[in-house]
Amino acid sequence: MGRKKTPKVNLRVHRPHNTQTTYINSRISMSKDYRRVRIQKGAGTTDTDPPPADEHQLEAEFPDLTDFPHDNIFHHQIAGIQIIAKPKRKRWESSRWDGTSFRRDSLFELGLTIQLRHRTGQMCPNQHPRKITVIHTNGFHKVKVSFCECNPKVPHRQQFLQNGWWPATPLDPKTVATFEVLRQFQYQNLQGNMTAYDFYHALEMQTDGRLSVQISERLASFMCMVREWRHCKQLKRAGKAHDPDGIDSTSNGELAIPCRLCPHPGKNLPDGWELETTKAFLYILFLYIDANFRLKCRSRESQKQDINLSPGWSYFVENKGYLEHVRKFANQEEISTCAGFQALHLANLKKKVGLCATGIGGVACRHELWRPNGLGDLQRGERYCNMDYILMASLVGTCILTVLASYDIACQFFINFLSRVLGLPSQLRNRVPSFKARVLKAHIVSHGVSCQSKYSFNWSEGVGRTDGEGIERLWAWLNKAAPSTKEMTPAGRWETLDDFCGYTNWRKTLNIGDTLLRKLIEALREADGHATEFAAFDKSIRDSNPNTVEQWEVTLEEWEKDRSKPCPYLSDKTDSLSVDDVRKILLERELKEVQSTPATTSKGLTSFITLGLDIETDQCILQAEIVEKTAMSTLDEADLTERRLSLRRKIERFREHQLTHMPSLAEHLDDGALDINTVDWEKCEQLPMYLPSSLTSELRTQTCSEQLISTESELRVAHLSEALDSLRLHLRSRVFANKFKIKNVTGQRSNTRSRQWQKTIDKKVLASKRRYRCSRTALYNLRGNGEWEKTYRELKDEDVRAFNERALTLTEIEERVAARRAAGIHEEEVLAAPLEDGIQLGEGRRHLSWIWLTQGCFDPKENDHALHVALRIEWARCKARALRWLEELELVSEEMRRAIEFCDYEESWWAGRIGLRTDVDAELGEGLKSYAHERVLAEREFKAKWEGQWSVVLSRAKAFLDNRDHPSTDADGISPDPLPAVEIDVPDPIERLNDM
């Protein structure tokens, strides 16, 4: 018989050419041996033809061993084995052919030996082999490792670290994890919320999908290695490896990633910033304060033995001093008395049995980055003693003069805040800045009116478009870790959440370029639009009554100085109207409207055109009512018949005049077109009048005199102005009627009558809208495009609203249409919703309808106190919106400048780390210098990228601010040229995090 074909032994391995290490100190026992190894990986192959082997040789593939750095692999059963680089994998990572099928075996059983600290192909003459478990990205591997025992001897843990393996224990480790698997888990945990438990068991299934081989439990060891890995990565990125004093000199909050956009004296603020008066708001530190009751922690017996590797070095406060302060207030119960918000009361009712932490208190900045030492556990609800400590701890080392802090219970929290600060440890109150308090925009709606006037962002100077809600968005990200961290020990939980916060801050840092660019583009457009809008609104009121506006300005200035005075942004509740008052106002307006209607008795051109316009108006109203009334009663039909007969008589009279003023018209129309007797009288509301504006340009020239065309044109302008005045009048009546109904009307009968009253007003609003649209279309046919369009704009449905009403959203419109269709209601309605008195969401983006920006919106002769109050409120709010957007434009521009300055500071700081340590060997010194150079280059790249992104838009913003600092009464609208399209590249945060 012939000789059997000998199977091959195929081992795919990695053979690095050079290594470069950086040692990082750790607080673990024997921590000086733990190093961060930076390896330049290479690849190498040998001959592709293996030597002959006997029939007992194994077939094995180890494709993933290329990820094991600095490996030196041997087979101890067969001498002279040749190594082959295998590009593809055909079977399992390690398998044995038993004659019928492949069987999975461990690398140890297949005879793999890894020699440490020797070149490939060399074995240590003083080797010390040991069987260990390696946790890698493709599962668990049992391998034989041969330690180097050559002089000078290197501890086994150091040999593991040099090989890119992290030992589970500093003494006699039997389990290691590769740097790759630790890095992979960290990314999946931070970005994908993969827990250590799930990740570990996924590796188990990847090792053996049938679980046919018992794998020793290594979960506790793996979690310990993950904690150590995270800790050392934080130290490395903070530059502690370059510190000659070591990590023991680390101060509280030093490992936290700082916000580059916040003001940092000496780093990104100009000289003399503290002396600035007119632009002092640019140097305010904005902070968000809040508590989160989802991030709990269970009490465990083992928590006392656990050690925090970085106590207070990152985002959580140092727990020992924190608890010493909190224990002084063990029985403190503080309940909010704000009628609209009971956060503290609800917090104190939270379940706390079996928990060592019922939640977390946090402090973040305006740019949504966690503050250093800005987190702390809550032992029992949201007590002031906890939040005081956390807030002041986040300000240690801050040399800012003014802090503006937003908090959902700011109306209660800051009442006695400064007196409570005196009870804090001395290191937290060395420098107490001036505090301003505000309430988050989405939360202030739930507060009382008295709180809204004092703590609103919308009505506060120097805050821009800050909303205070950024910390809520941060909680949403951090809450992903709540289920897993709840089961951890306190120390492990703090370190894990510190890592999550650091990842969040790093993501925000990477997105600074795109975020600020979007904000600046929006601020530039909105600042111009709102400033122009306010200037037009202010001018329309000043032209009628300048003294009134001056009085409003004085009132606004006095309130800014003393907020205990009546708020100019809110109505006075004492000025309520009775039923008789409202009826009197409406009757007076109707009488005034009737008196202002011109008579039509003359038989000249004016009376002829006026009669035609009146007929068109009557036809429009009648057509709308016929569409609305799908089912008519006998009385309705009789009324309709009477109105049609009246309209028919008007048309007959008009046709007589038309023969006089347009004698040649009949020649150009169909036979009988002007004969009313040939038309069904029941369709007289559809009969065309053939006014000059309704004819084609050619026919108009042939049948109409220039005087006739000019007369209609002038009357159309008058009708437009009259329709606009009527529309504004009825819209004001609509608002007052709605407010009166809400406040005074109760009961079904009264509500039915009141609703009928409101419906009557709505019909008048819609009639004025139709009249305006009809007249504008006619005027456009006569004049075409021109300057008149700036005054009499196109009237859209969303424009038909009072100055204290908002346009409905598309969703609200669709819901209304569906509801009315289901109810069988087909009549038209006003698409506007009233604004409640006080703060409303979206106030900063609300725009006035253009109908209130034209002359005539304010009549000084109209003795209507409620109207004057409503105008004053809207004037003040319109001005506030314009100011906030201009402030936002200035703030974002300043933040861009700070970001660039901070890059220069960081570059200089890291450049100073190069060669700072002289107590290290050449290998470590090379690694330290390399990393410092890498960070210097990264800061230069940040600066170059951001300057390129912002230059065009920033120059536009500066030009805009140079032309107009704040909205004024004589400011003309300056509309910048359209901004160029800007492409925004969103960087991969994981890739950049890996680079750092």
Image: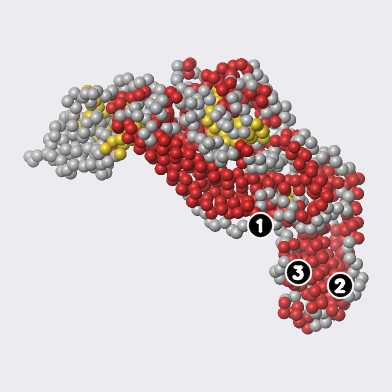
Q: Is residue 737 left or right of residue 415?
A: right
Badge number at residue 719: none
Q: Label 2, secondary structure: give it.
A: helix
Q: Earlier in the sequence, mark 1 or mark 3?
A: 3
Badge number at residue 606: 2
Q: Is residue 283 left or right of residue 986?
A: right
For mark 1, what is the residue? Answer: 974
Q: Confirm or deny contact between disc 1 and disc 3 (CB under 8 A).
A: no
Is 618 above or below relative to 922? below
Q: The residue under label 3 is which amino acid type?
A: Ala
Badge number at residue 778: 3
Q: Assess disc 3: are there few (<14), some (14-19) or many (≥20) residues with their C-alpha within 10 Å of its C-alpha.
A: many
Q: Label 1, secondary structure: give it.
A: loop
Residue at the (86%, 75%) spot, across then down:
605
Q: Is residue 655 left or right of residue 338?
A: right
Q: The residue under label 2 is which amino acid type?
A: Thr
Alpha carbon distance from label 1 to label 3: 31 Å
Q: Quadrant of residue 775 in the image?
A: bottom right
Q: Quadrant of residue 920 in the image?
A: top left
Q: Is residue 446 visible?
A: yes
Residue at the (33%, 24%) spot, across then down:
33
Alpha carbon distance from label 1 to label 2: 41 Å
Q: Nearer the viewer, mark 1 or mark 2?
A: 1
